[in-house]
Image (cartoon, grey):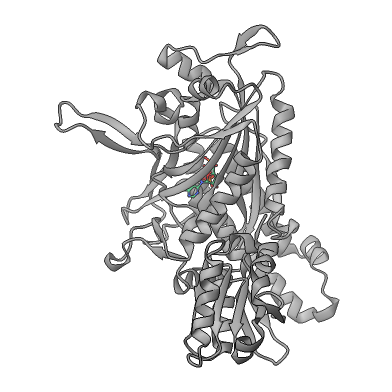
Amino acid sequence: QEDQFKKVLSHAKEYGYVFQSSEIYDGLSAVYDYAQNGVELKKNIRDYWWKAMVQMHENIVGIDAAILMHPTTWKASGHVDAFNDPLIDNKDSKKRYRADVLVEDFREKINQKIQKDITKAKKRFGDDFNEDEFRATNQNVVRRQKQIDEISAELTRVQEESDLEGFRNLILDLGIVCPVSGSKNWTEVKQFNLMFGTKIGASAENSTQVYLRPETAQGIFVNFLNVQKTGRMKIPFGIAQTGKAFRNEIVARQFIFRMREFEQMEMQFFVKPGTQKEWYENWKQTRLKWHLSLGMGQENYRFHDHDKLAHYADAAADIEFNFPFGFKELEGIHSRTDFDLKAHEEYSGKKLQYFDHTENKSYVPYVVETSIGLDRMFLAVFSNSLQEEALENGTTRTVLKLPAVLAPFKAAVLPLVKKDGLPEVAKQIMEDLKWDFNVFYDEKDAVGKRYRRQDAAGTPFCITVDHDSLEDNSVTIRHRDTMEQKRVKISDLKEIIKAEVDV
Ligand code: ATP
């Protein structure tokens, strides 16, 4: 798994998908730039979401609210008082760590020991090895598994109760050592607010403290009535938005999984009070279907229903994806009650109510939210698509099997040789196709090598122009996944590609 993750990182750089931010200055931790191919993949994911959520729903509209908002917004939303991570310092190394991550790492180490035992036993017993039986009977494994379960239960409890003392006790009880100095000399656990602050205004006296938004949702809540009235929206209806959000994450690892500057795709669905459970179930299924429509394997998704809920929610679930480092949250579906709108009513002194003509009364709607990280979705798609394939001739090929609808370039046009008028025909094909798709042109190196390059870059089709093309107005089209090659008319290319990349 670790190996696969390393491959993902290096492939993302080598093929122009993701670069470290300000790399020439050794980068900025947990901040990344999308490169020439990455920007296209990211845009295609965003468009795929927007199409499914906005274009396909006549009762959902979009907005694009500003990143900077009135600071009271974040008082009302609870982010000023309660958007915190538990931090602990090591007294000897003077290094700071997220308390929950230290414990999680420790748990992971025990897990690795179990895996090692299993690998050893597998080697020893060969075909007779039964993993379930081994896990249930081997004393070492049973003991370790029990320890993992206990740590997990206690970690969940202290997280949910924000029990800072409990965090510290866990770290001390487990004897967790500082990864840098190896010492066990820890301070108290403190809460650290994750919002990035900045100032508006020219002089120190007149400046106002503002925040870079830590979620896009609040821009939707404060615009709820404006959109409802000007769009003459009738409940149930939704407002969707994609855009940057910022969090001063303390432990920022795992590449673009957890970033300090990231992008969210959120939709707030406003419903009649009392109907929220039904809509919550409905959106859970709708969102899962959206994921499955990309064909990345049903077995790679699962729901995680939350037992303990945030103060604003009456139901919440994550859609988890099987990332190279295991199942982790990709999207959240939250039934947020009327918490946000009520809080904004209270802090702004303005009514945020809907007049329901069928009921002949006003009320503050309930909200069901779907919230997905665009960068996390990018990582899910990219890591799932990157595959090493053993070929019949004994060699292997690296292929990025991106869903065709998301691929940065839909086709590459390749003249077999750089002469005899073949480039001219290839360029003409480019001219014809570029109105409908992103098409790539490549005339360098042998054609086999160019195929491999396009496989690794994720391009679903290669179109090769050869000498016969001059006579028969046909070309060879090669399919990335099957490597199948077919002779087709140049005039049919557009329809053939469209059939695969359109949704
Ligand atoms: P996590 O528990 O992983 O920190 P969260 O529960 O805080 O996530 P939400 O506040 O529910 O996340 O945000 C909704 C979505 O935004 C998440 O499902 C995730 O896809 C994305 N997201 C949140 N934080 C980050 C981040 N630091 N970097 C990238 N994506 C993020």
- Position of residue 280 in the picture relative to residue 262 (left or right): right
Observer-nearest of 60 and 417: 417
Quarter of the image for residue 269 reads: top right
Q: Position of residue 435 (x, y in %)?
A: 53, 62
- Is residue 165 placed above or below 99 in the rendered structure? above
Residue at left offset 52%, top offset 72%: 430
Observer-nearest of 165 and 96: 96
- Is residue 248 placed above or below 323 in the rendered structure? above
| Quarter containing the N terminus | bottom right
| Quarter containing the C terminus | bottom right
- Position of residue 29 in the picture relative to residue 298 (left or right): left
Q: Position of residue 165 (x, y in %)?
A: 47, 37
- Is residue 201 placed above or below 274 in the rendered structure? below
- Position of residue 216 in the picture relative to residue 399 (left or right): left
Residue at left offset 56%, top offset 54%: 45
- Tell me, yes or no, if residue 239 can be seen here: yes
- Tell me, yes or no, if residue 104 can be seen here: no
Residue at left offset 70%, top offset 74%: 119
